[in-house]
Amino acid sequence: MPRTDFGPPHYMEMLPPVIKRNYGRWKYHEILRPGVLKHVAESGEEIYSIRVGSPRLVSTDFIREVCDLADKYCDGYVRFTSRHNIEFLVTNKENIEPLIQEVRAKGWPVGGTGNCLSNMVHTQGWIHCHTPATDASGIVKAVMDELYEYFVEEKLPAKLRISLACCLNMCGAVHCSDIAILGVHRTPPRVDHELLAKVSEIPTVVASCPTGAIRPNPKLKSVEVNEERCMYCGNCFTMSPAMQIMDPENDGVSIWVGGKVSNARTAPMFSRLAIPYLPNNPPRWPEVVQAVKKLVEVWATHARKGERMGEWIERIGWETFFKLADIPFTDKHIDDFIFSVPTFRTTTQFRW
Ligand code: SF4
Ligand code: SF4
């Protein structure tokens, strides 16, 4: 296998032998129970994936424990999904039960498949990035703790995908998730003219603004912000530490609903704004947790079997959704529901 001096090794090197032998010739898969997937190849060979939730921010000790289990039951083969689930890849059927028992004994949940809530995809938050309006793993932990039952039991109408991005740059999949938690800044950047003149190139800072809100201020050898045009995205702060956007009093969280990537049954959908603002309230974010829980419960109570959140909302109409979810429709929703997407009020299909 050719190797370069950067990047990960080629993925083929990492595949379990059974997958290599049957590469591109898999016939079907089924979910035996929450967290246990069976894949069958045309040759008749099988592989089982045991899906386990992880808190994502993990210690080296945790990873060593995972690897020890993989050595014991999976010939060393284990993977992390893009939603930070661990998947133990088991070829010997006899190993499934003892593995699950050991996993549960450690307090790790088995589930996340089929009509379950899978682990949340999320971004870096306060621990890593410099532009977040909220934390990532902190909220995710609090939300997943509250929704634990939906990870380990298949009792939802359809699969549920929740995501979190800690600012509008949106490194997470918030644009297309059943429920999306999105950090929002709500005040324009505060320019530190002295610092900007020392550390930033003015044309770069001006060019960083997607709405053209920044213009040069030659007198100060700095820039100024037209606040009317600012959408608080924080992109300028990414370019210059002199454009401070963090605002502990006003930063917070918005909630979006109804997106999906899947093309099954209906076309993919973008998430739409449901709740414009909830406060940052660490360490357990009770307002956000309750809002997400309520959305899950309302959907689970009213949707038909197989209906994703967005499909259910499209069927009942957004007005009914807002009423059932007890969410006020405010002026903050208008752009999203009237102008930005031609499939809503601008067509006769819009139901309100
Ligand atoms: Fe950083 Fe924004 Fe990405 Fe969060 S979403 S990791 S704040 S760029
Ligand atoms: Fe422009 Fe975004 Fe900076 Fe506002 S926060 S000035 S919109 S780059």
Image: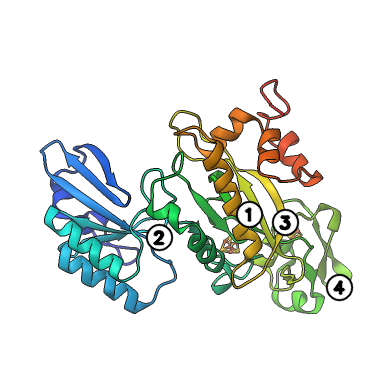
75 versus 127 height, above or below: above
Q: Which residue is mark 4?
A: 220
Residue 46 % position (x, y): 15, 45
Q: Earlier in the sequence, mark 3 or mark 4?
A: 4
Asked if marks 1 and 2 touch (Cβ < 8 Å), the reply is no
In the rendered view of the protein, which quadrant contains the C terminus?
A: top right
Q: Which residue is mark 1?
A: 291
Report crowding for label 4: few under 14, some 14 to 19, many 20 or more residues within 10 A (C-alpha). few
Asked if marks 3 and 4 touch (Cβ < 8 Å), the reply is no
Three-letter code for the amino acid on which mark 1 is drawn: Ala
Q: Which residue is mark 3?
A: 277
Nearer to me, 260 or 187? 260
Q: Earlier in the sequence, mark 1 or mark 2?
A: 2
Q: Which residue is mark 2?
A: 84
Asked if marks 3 and 1 touch (Cβ < 8 Å), the reply is no
Quarter-of-image position of residue 138: bottom right
Three-letter code for the amino acid on which mark 4 is drawn: Leu
Q: In the visual, does 29 lie left or right of 192?
A: left
25 versus 117 height, above or below: above
Nearer to me, 72 or 202? 72
Three-letter code for the amino acid on which mark 2 is drawn: His
Please name the residue shown 56% across and 33% down the image: 312
Ligand 1 position by quadrant: bottom right
Please name the residue shown 21% across and 61% down the image: 77
In the rendered view of the protein, which quadrant contains the N terminus?
A: bottom left
Nearest to the eye among marks 3 and 1: give it. Answer: 1
257 versus 165 height, above or below: above
